[in-house]
Amino acid sequence: MAALSEQEQEILAFEHLRWKSEGAKEEEIRRRFGVEPWRYFQQLNALIDRPEAQEADPVTVRQLLQRRG
């Protein structure tokens, strides 16, 4: 099983943050990760399907999977 990259770990940590508005989160995604929000969310959705993400942060991954439905 491959370990999570530094960026993947940062994405999981980023999902712990709370935002007053979706616009603020989107701006921070652009600034911090250098991608458009739609691309970030593609990466996030692929990441939470990986067993390595589940092992690294089971609570966050479970919450994200529940939100995704």
Image: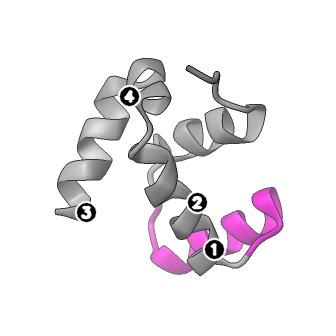
* Inter-mark Cα distance, 3 to 4: 15 Å
The kind of residue tagged 1 is Arg
Element type where label 3 sits in the image? helix
Residue assigned mark 1: 39
The earlier-in-sequence mark between 3 and 2 is 2
The residue depicted at 42 percent of the width and 25 percent of the height is 57
The answer to whether the residue labelled 2 contacts the one labelled 1, judged by CB atoms less than 8 Å apart, is: yes
Residue holding disc 3: 68
Residue receiving disc 4: 54
**Amino acid type for the residue under numbered disc 4:** Gln
Q: Secondary structure at mark 4?
A: helix
Task: Give the Cα distance between marks 3 and 2.
Answer: 13 Å
Quickly name the residue at label 2. Answer: 43
Magenta residue span: 19-35
Amino acid type of disc 2? Gln
Q: Earlier in the sequence, mark 1 or mark 3?
A: 1
